[in-house]
Image: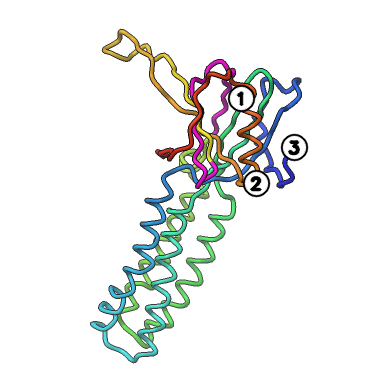
Amino acid sequence: MFPAKALALPPQLDWQYKDEPALAEWSLKARAYNTDIANGIFVFFLIGQIPLLIWFLSTQGGSLQEQILVGAFLYIFTMSGVLSMTHQKTKFAYRLTASGLEFCEWKEFPKWLPQLLKWAAIITGVVMLMLAMVHPAALIGAIAGPGLMGLMYLRMGTSSQFRRMHERFHQGFHPWSDFTKMTVFRRRSIIGLHFEWYNPEGDGGKGRMIPWEEILYCRKTQLNELIGIIRKQLPESTPYTEAYIPIYA
């Protein structure tokens, strides 16, 4: 339905209502967490480590050229790690039919990551050893940095448990009758569909209904069209609002 290039779906995904024509279907990568906090952390490191590096390098001695070279390397190395933590993305796929909403979210272990760490360890080792020849303080980094990367590379390559920790797959379905409210968060192009589910262990084992919200991540160009499609499937009495939707990782 939508012109954007679809993601390659995981092989274990089997839509429950695949025989029904789709009212809409799309897939995308999204940051499924509070991006305001994540962006704040990124900006803090982006700006905050500059005076810290200046102070640290000024205590180590050496020429200005050496300090700039070491500082630039440490800055890029640190920001690469911060970026990988604050800008992670999860893959999502959605399919809307007359029966309801089907969704899938998954996260695959990045196959390129072990190779990246391997070559990063080699390059870092060479650079830090060269720096150690002119700046003794870099010798610690020449040992610790590449060594840590090498250990992570070996763990990724040999530990299936480590890989499973970084993989995720979840598939679900809701009939339209489940939803009691619709919320749209336009700044992030998110649709929230409210529903309740029964928790038998709630209230000390007595059981109770838990209010919840199914989050649909969309592209900005799709948002208005999807709002119209979904509202047609919900009863006219279903409350609709546009507001901030908190996202908890």
Percent x, y for residue 93?
A: 62, 35
Numbered disc in front, either 2 or 1? 2
Look at the image and tell me in which quarter the C terminus lies.
top left
Q: Earlier in the sequence, mark 1 or mark 3?
A: 3
Amino acid type of the residue that numbered disc 2 sits on in the rendered structure: Thr
Q: Is residue 42 left or right of residue 228?
A: left
Residue under circle 3?
1
Q: Quadrant of residue 147?
A: bottom left
Q: Where residue 78 sits: x, y (%)?
A: 40, 66
**With respect to residue 139, does 28 lie above or below?**
above
- CB-based contact (under 8 Å), mark 2 and mark 1: no
Which residue is found at the position 44% from the left and 38% from the top? 243
For the residue pair 116 and 239, the one nearer the viewer reads as: 239
Query: Is the residue marked by circle 2 packed among few (<14), some (14-19), or many (20+) residues within 10 Å?
Result: few
Is 227 or 58 nearer to us in this picture?
Answer: 227
Q: Tell me the residue that label 2 is attached to.
A: 221
Task: Tell me, yes or no, whether the highlighted magenta stretch contains residue 153.
Answer: no
Give the residues in magenta: 169-189
**Along the polypeptide, which appears first: circle 2 or circle 1?**
1
Residue toward you, 192 or 115: 192
The CA distance from mark 1 to mark 3 is: 16 Å
Q: Quadrant of residue 227?
A: top right
Q: Which residue is mark 1?
A: 101
